[in-house]
Image (spheres, coloured by chain):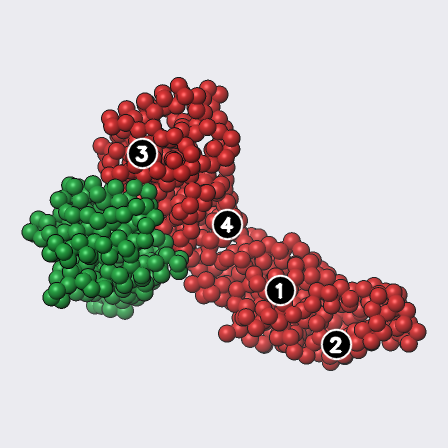
Chain colours: A green, B red
Amino acid sequence: MPTVLVTELAERPSLGAPSLAQRLRSSRSVFERVRSLSGVGALSNDQLETVEEVLLRSDVGVTTTNMILDNLRENGAPEGIAYAVRASLLDSLNAERSVVTTAESGRVPVWLFVGVNGVGKTTTIGKLAKRQIDAGRSVVLAAGDTFRAAAADQLEQWATRTGADIVRSAEGADPGSVVHDALGRAAARGADIVLADTAGRRSNSTNLLDELSKVRRVADREPGQVVETFMVLDATTGQNALSQAREFLAAADVTAIVLTKLDGTARGGIVVAIERELGIPVKFVGIGEGVEDLIAFDPEAFVDSLLDA
Amino acid sequence: MFDALSERFERLGTSLRSRGRLSEADLDEALSEVRSALLEADVELGVVRAFLEAVRERLSGETLSQSLSPGQQVIKAVNEQLIEVLGGSALKVTYASKPPTVILLAGLQGAGKTTTAAKLAAWFKQQGRQPYLIAADLQRPAAVEQLRVLGAQVGVDVFSESSSPIDVARHGVKEATRLGRDVVIIDTAGRLSIDEALMDEVRSISRVTSPHYTFLVIDAVTGQDAVVTARAFHETLALSGIIVTKLDYDARGGAVLSARGVVGRPVVFASTGEKMDDFELFHPDRMASRILGMGDVLSLIEQAEQKMDSDVIAEGAGRMMSGTFTLDDFLAQMNQVRKMGSLGGIMKMMPGVTKEMRIAASNVDEGELNKIEAIIQSMTTREKREPVIIDGSRRTRIARGSGTTVSAVNQLLKQFTEMRKMMRQMGGGMPAMPGGMGRMANMAQKAQRGDALPPGFEALGAGMRSAQPARGGGGKNKKKKGGRVTPPKQR
């Protein structure tokens, strides 16, 4: 009996997101005819289903997909379906995306990194440290993940690789005290910025979120000042990402998202819902394991990749 | 989400109940709700489609259940299908006749392979085996160190060397053989399914170690990509099973169904937390209700189905209407409800039950119900049928026989007489069922709130509600027709 699904799926050539552009190209002439006939941009059910399929497969989510479909039904697509869908998506991605790198005078700017387990927080810090150092700034890393075995070792390797300074403590130590020490070091040496790692944690545990709030408070105390709190999000994540963002926003005042692992087959469409519903913008995307593989988020390129998979 | 879905299912098919069969329209409506639920749970679109087809097949032509509403019946079928797909062809780990039994773990970055490797080693150790860990993730900085620390935590040796992942794996298995270890677990680097070089590498690791089991480690928060990843790893490594991680998250975990559906291999283990012993054999039934998001409604449906004898209830309801309801009927009804467990327990399982209702239910003293039962059972058949004949001396006898007091007997008889009078008013001179049924629903609701009726009768109220769907007939009373075992939602 369980083989039912397997047979059905095995016959499909690919379950990867089909290219909307491709599929629409073939239906475009049909669409043009429909439009010229009715004079309005009324869409056929087939066309709407194609749009729905592409959006759902990119993890945009049922709510956002329905919103875009309603939009299409209501307003038609006088300039083409692909154009209309693209515009709808871009509408949801209109937040300010500049990255804050400086603090009030006399204080050390802190970037705090939060997220669930295994999304790539430590790797992201390594890559961002490299960017800062390349820009001529001195960086102190705070190994605030004192929970996962060898997390500090992992960050230390990044410090060595990028030439950043690092403050670490024993496993199981209080993460707040690590961040506190890192701020002391940064202030004493006149470092330009502190990048603080935290342990991966699920977003449905009050205790773990409380601990995170505390770390953030410590990081925001003089001489430190938290200027960005990045929630690192793995592009393969589904609808749960929204609840992650909601909880981390409440606990740590998240200001931006770093979307990692976008070089795989996952599209990361859920960030559209996150930005639309919570107003948290994506600022960086991770596109590989190399130290340079982190780039600024470009909404247009992102939307194109959602639709042109 | 949860509430909304339950509610939509509540409404489903109320107008069509009397037809005795699920109509296509009913089914379409129900399955479209299920579709949304599955998509919101991150089940991959293609898998959703195939799954819904299977459910449709399962349900088409099925006659309507006596004890369940159409909505409940659909949920039940969906749940059964989920369990079947998730749990089909379960894998039983057998050990190689010539040890060691080699296990290879693979998956995307961050799925939790290293932690899983250590947990799996601990699990085997608990089974009385002597596991050995091989750290073949040379990609991620400090991954070897992480496995070493975790290995020490669970008391399992870890093999590592700074060569290549393929050599580490080969040498590790050789070393395990030399040491006489009987289970070897190989941790590999996380890799993207489209990274050909790394997929080739893991294929080579598999070739040189000939694993007896190859597990894909997949994380429960994964979205639509689960299918692409699972298929690619299956094509490369011929997976023997799936291990799902991060089940302690609040994700609904549809990725498990996606991966299971596309790979056709069982989910074997589930990782449910960060501690080393947060690891267990996979439970398809728990996963099914989680994906469906209907929580304990499912267990309630099951209980109602198994334990409610709809004939008894229907008969009782019929007699209530005709005014020939006896103390025997009353007892039978009460016991039907009790068979489902304590009222408080039932209430706890139902969604939409307010705190006040729960408290009221827990105030229904089970001991009180026992007393009522004893009193009724101490009566003669004739007394039960015609309570009017119970005079003073009979009361004394009954009280003695049931170990209660005369006043308790008096109280029960008084309440029963009042109740029967009420029923007669309702049913009498009203041959058309619907209206009467509507009023009965009202009464049941009253009983639900705990006013008007004494303790034992509250239970009966619940029984009456359960009786309704089986008897059908859309009344004018649009308001919660009681119906089903799920109580009317009160906000």
Q: Pick whichever, B427 or B375, lies toward us.
A: B375
Q: Chain of mark 4?
A: B
Sequence-first tag of 3 and 2 = 3
In percent of width and height, residue B373 lies at 78, 64
Q: Does residue B201 sit above or below A244 in this rendering?
A: above
Quick check: can you spot residue A289? Answer: no
Query: Where is residue A161 drawn, in percent x and y?
Result: 15, 41
Cα separation, mark 1 vs mark 3, equals 50 Å
Q: Nearer the viewer, residue A135 or B369?
A: A135
User: Quarter of the image holding residue B269?
Assistant: top left
Label 4 crowd bin: few (<14), some (14–19), many (20+), radius 10 Å: few
Residue sitting farthest toward the right = B393
- Mark carried by residue B344: 1
Q: Give how far across and how far down residue A157 sits, in percent.
A: 20, 41
Q: In this rendering, would B405 be left or right of A277?
A: right
- Contact, CB < 8 Å: mark 1 with mark 2? no
Considering only order in the chain, which callout, 4 or 2, is on the residue closer to the N terminus?
4
Q: Amino acid at mark 3?
A: Thr
Name the disc covering residue A178, or none. Answer: none
Q: Nearer the viewer, mark 1 or mark 4?
A: 1
Kindly identify which numbered label has been placed on residue B419: 2
Q: Earlier in the sequence, mark 1 or mark 4?
A: 4
Up the image or down, A305 lies above or below B230; here it is below
Q: Nearer the viewer, mark 4 or mark 3?
A: 3
Element at badge 2? helix
* Disc 1 + disc 3, Cβ < 8 Å: no
Say which amino acid is labelled 1: Gly
Mark 1 element type: helix
Relative depth, front residue between B7 and A240:
A240
Residue pointed to by mark 3: B188
Rendering quarter of residue B422: bottom right
